[in-house]
Amino acid sequence: MRILLIGRQGSGKGTQAKLVAERHKIPNISTGDIFRDASALRTDLGMKAEAYMKKGHLVPDEIVTSLVKERVRQKDCRDGFVLDGFPRNISQAKALDKITNLDKVFVLKLSDDLAIKRLSQRRQCKKCKSVYGGIIATRKKGICDKCHGKLYQREDDKPAAIRKRLSIYHKETEPLVDYYKKKGIVHLINANQPVEKIAAEISRHLYHEADMLEL
Ligand SMILES: [Zn+2]
């Protein structure tokens, strides 16, 4: 099963990608992990990607695509994978089509208002970098459960920054939904549900498919 999850910031896409990967025993491939691995191994592509990120720039499509290509050809991807964060625009999707075919695309749907509400409640620990759903999500208000560090709101979780990220999502990533709908592999999932319910819904679609294959 080659799976892609699409969802705006705040939709819980990263969490779901991890859960689906664990349940179906396939690797979870996120662009963040690919960048980290490639720069740790000091590969040519990894060093290039790192140079862009250090300057705070987006890594160009050609580099991301080449890195993903290397990754999905590794042995552990033989039975499939869960992609998270790639492709993030139509040109990357077209490049991916040349590398591999996806079996399923899950779109985690969430309104802008809810995404903004969720993200603006998010707090991070200054010391150990743990992320919490909000200051009241911890045992002691404003204090990290793990290391007792102080929680703060990251710059990119402030409303103006969130709106900017959402508008980029609408403009660049959302067109992917129609792109994959034309291939008949899209499932829309309501992301305004508890994590477990969303995971169960995704699994149902995947198992249903597996049953069909056995028949
Ligand atoms: Zn902490």
Image: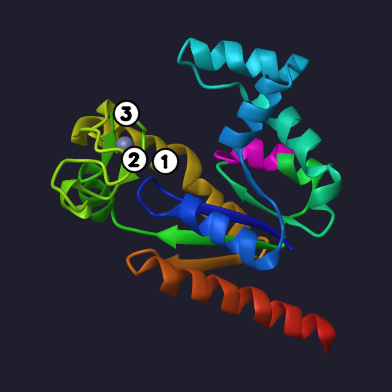
The correct choice, above or below, for 93 with respect to 164 in the image is: below
Mark 3 highlights which residue?
A: 127
Q: Are marks 2 and 1 in contact (CB under 8 Å)?
A: yes
Q: How far apart are the two marked residues, 2 and 1, measured between alpha carbons? A: 5 Å
Q: Is residue 56 left or right of residue 33?
A: left
The residue that appears at 30% across and 30% down in the rendered structure is 156
Q: Is residue 83 magenta?
A: no
Mark 2 highlights which residue?
A: 166
Give, as a three-letter code, the residue at label 3.
Lys
The correct choice, above or below, for 65 with respect to 99 in the image is: above
Ligand 1 within 8 Å of disc 3? The answer is yes
Mark 1 highlights which residue?
A: 169
Is residue 212 or residue 133 the one in the foreground?
133
Quadrant assignment for the N terminus: bottom right
Q: Is residue 89 magenta?
A: yes
The residue that appears at 34% across and 69% down in the rendered structure is 193
Q: Residues within 10 Å of mark 2 (few under 14, many from 20)?
A: some
Is residue 131 or residue 95 the one in the foreground?
131
The numbered mark, 2 or 3, whose residue comes first in the sequence reads 3
Give, as a three-letter code, the residue at label 2.
Leu
Span colored in magenta: 86-95
Q: Residues within 10 Å of mark 1 (few under 14, many from 20)?
A: some
The residue that appears at 69% across and 20% down in the rendered structure is 46
Image spot of residue 202 (x, y percent): 55, 71
Q: Is residue 178 visible?
A: no
Q: Quadrant of residue 183?
A: bottom right
SS for tag 1? helix
Quadrant assignment for the C terminus: bottom right
Give, as a three-letter code, the residue at label 1.
Tyr
